[in-house]
Structures are given as structure tokens and as C-alpha cells.
Image (cartoon, rainbow, N blue to C red):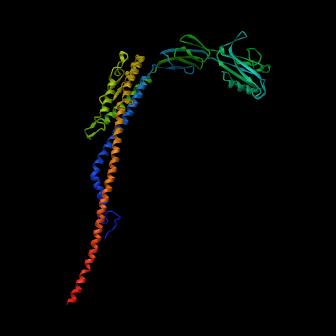
Amino acid sequence: MSGIISSPGIGSGLDINSIVSKLVQADYGSQQTQIKNQESTLNAELSAYGSINSDVSSISDSLTSLQNLSASYGASSSASGVVSVATQSGAAPGSYNVNVTQLASAQSLASADYSSPTATVGTGTLTFQFGSYANGSFTANSNAPVQVNIDSSNNTLQGVANAINQANFGVSATIVNDGSGYKLALTSKTGSNNELNISSSNSNLSALTYNGGSTGMTQTVASADAKLSINGIAVSSQSNTITDAVQGVNFTLGATGSATVSVTPDTNSVINAVQAFVKAYNSYAQDNSKYNSYDSKTKQAGILLGDATLRTLTSQLQNGVVSPIAGAPANYSNLMALGITAKSDGTLSLNTSQLTTALNTDYSGVITALQGAGKQLGGAVSSMTGANGILTARTNTINQQLTGLQNQLSTLSTQMQQQQQMLLTQYNSMDTLVANLKNTGSYLTQALASLPSVTSSSSSKKA
């Protein structure tokens, strides 16, 4: 008698799923574990190299900053309200006694009173020229005349002010209410050579003209040049910002009075750049120690212990730090002369006092040395981190190995599934056979159980 087994093991009473799973694990488990362990190790190596790459990138950035250092100077004023100061390219260290006797001022003009800002004025063209007046005669400067057109769309007092401002040629216009009426007020550029001459194409705009006389607009503030002395040398300027008196130094005047201006080397930016390099290098050195060492107490080895790529990288960085700097002044031919020394644990230390002394002694020489060090060591780092560098190659190799292991795991998984299916088929067939045998046995047992009653009946008849 045959039967259908719907669940493995019903016929035989065995846990077929468990048996099959254990058989598959016995055949493939150790291989799968080995691959996963290799995968875990490679992932840990990849993570470690991620940290190393980040460290080296920071070193590279700091070396670029060293390469880009320039002999820059900062400036300060003992009385910034009198004169503030800034430096630019070409500045040199020095001290300057500045005495401001007059600030530059701009000429201001005002029209006669109008009833309101919307009061109508004439139409035509207003022509503006910059220059100076002498003995009632106007001499224009090199600036080209500017024409402002007044027509029916803007022939009000406010319209004229707006048109002048929109022309944007260095004259500002506004409407002022002095209590008796509204005036058009104009302000020119600072300096005695920026006085205004205003003419009109039509006589109906004559009230808004100016020629230094008594007709048209009236001067309310006279123009003036800035007057000062720098270390006793008289200086005159059309503007309160003076850029050409001392090379590389800009003076901005704020009030009359005296001040001492000091121009000194910008040592702080240099020290900060060197500190950034030391910090980046030490971060690498600490990670190198973490990944490439053996702890005798815990008996734990770093994930990159003995790694050839890391060993090469560390060696080149260490050599770069102690190597002579090409093109550097003799007094600063290596980083040690600038206060940078290597410690026994692989990190660097910076003697800030030594570096500061060197900067104060030979500022440009130290800059040259640091630029050379940045270029020299930066080139070595770039060769290791570029597309064909050892760091890139090592990372690519790890990724390729991980891809290979993942492919192996995928193939192994397929094989395990096939093996499992084959074993389940075999055990299910056995289970079905056992179930059928059990059914047959039950039938025979029942049949045999009826035999004694038949035998007893036959014996009674013979008696």
C-alpha cells in the first residue's frame, strides 16, 4: 500500500531537514567559514586603509599650504580712529609716524527751494564735469563729461535726483527739506580736483546748473584734499584712502591727529601652517602605530602588521621629513633647523619658540625653506596617492580580492542549495518507502490477527 509524505520525516520519524542541513554544513561549512573570515579580514584592511588615505590626504593639504606660503606682512596702528592700515603685495617691515592735518572732503551743492519733491522742473540735458576752479575759471580733469537727460517722465525734483543716481558716475543726489522748502542736494567725489561744473541744454534747467558763480546751485561744502605727513614727508591725496605713498601699505584716514603704523612679518600664519602639517603627520603616525604593531600583553596584532605598502609609505614619509631641503638657505637646510624633530614613537614635535626665532631672524629665508619642503615632500606624497600610486594600487587590490570572495560565496551558496535539494529528494524518497513499508506491515499485522479465530473453528469441527 503506497502513501504520499507531505512533510519530511513523517514516514521514518527522522528530522530530515536537520539531517540534511548538517550534512550540507559538513560538506561546505568549513569552506564557507574560511571565505567569510577572509572577507572580514579584507574589510578590516580596507577600513584601515581608508583611515590611512584620509591621513595622507590631510598631509598633502598641509604641504600644499606650505608651498603656497608667501612673505606676507601685517600692519597695525596705534590710533586706528586716526588712520587704519592694511598691507598688500610688496609691503616691507617698517615703522611709520603718520600725522593727519586735514581730511579729504567732497564738494556739496544745493538748489533753491521747491514746494515739494514732485515739483516740476524743466526738461533738457544736464552735463556734469569734474575738475577745479581757479580765479573763477573751471579746468576739467581727465574724466569724461556725463550727460543726464531730463524729460517728461522725470522732470520733477525727485525725478532729477533719481536720474543722477541711476547714472552712477560718482555724484550722489538726494532731496533735503530745510524747513522752508525742498532742495536738490548733490555730493561729488572727494578731493579738490573733483569739483563740479553743471551746464544745461535748456534755460529752464538753469536753476540746477553750477559754474562756481552765484547763479544756479549754491556750494554748501567745499572740496579739499587730504593732507598728512609720513615720517616727516608731506603727502597730499584726493582721497582719504592712500594706496601709493608707501609701497604695499594702504592708509585709510578717519580723523586728524597722529598715529604710529607698524608693518611686521605675519609670523602667525606661518606657524599655523607648520602646526597643521605636524598635526596631520602625527595623525598618520598614530594610525600607522595602531595598524602596524603587535601588543605583547594582549597578543593582538594590528590588521596591517607587516604590510609592505604601509611600510613603504611610512619609510618615504620619514625620509622626506629628515632629508635636506633643495634650494633652502644654508641655515635652514632641513626641517630640524626650523624646530621640527622626530620622536621615538614616530610622531613629530614642533619647537614653536625655535621657529619663531628663525622667522624673526630671517623671515624670507624661512619662507623659502618651508616652500621647498612643501614642494619636495608634497611631490613624494602625490606619487604615492595618485592614480598609479601605491596607496591606490593597494586599495584596488583589496577591492578586487573582496569581489573575488563574494563571487566564491555566491558560487558556494548555489552549490549548497543544490546539494541540499538533492539530499532532501533522496531522504524524502526513503521516507516515502518507509511509510509504505509501515502501511504494508500494518495490513499484514491485521491480517494475521484474524488467523487464530479461523484455526479454532476448524479444531472444533474435528472433535
Q: Is residue 384 above or below residue 135?
A: below
180 lies left or right of 418: right
Q: Residue furthest right?
A: 204
Which residue is outermost to the left?
463
> Does residue 259 appear in this view?
yes
Q: Give 94 or 7, whichever is nearer the viewer.
A: 7
- Can you give x and y, in whole percent of width and height, for residue 137 in the image? 72, 10
As drawn, which residue projects farthest toward the bottom? 463
Q: Quadrant of residue 354?
A: top left
Query: Quadrant of the image for the C terminus?
Result: bottom left
Q: Is residue 181 or residue 406 the one in the foreground?
A: 406
46 left or right of 120 in image: left
Give percent across and percent down for residue 345. 30, 31
Q: Residue at x 35, y 33 (%)?
A: 393
Give residue 437's quadrant in the image. Answer: bottom left
Left or right: 352 with respect to 118?
A: left
Rendered location of residue 323, percent (x, y): 33, 22
Residue at 70% x, 24% y: name it. Answer: 164
| Relative depth, front residue between 454 and 143 | 454
- Please report the residue visible at 29 percent of the width from the left and 54 percent of the height from the top: 24
Q: How many marks?
A: 0
Residue 424 horizontal/vertical position (percent) = 31, 58
Q: Nearer the viewer, residue 202 or 99?
A: 202
In the rendered image, the quadrant that contains the N terminus is: bottom left
Q: Quadrant of residue 146?
A: top right
Residue 77 visible in the current orientation: no
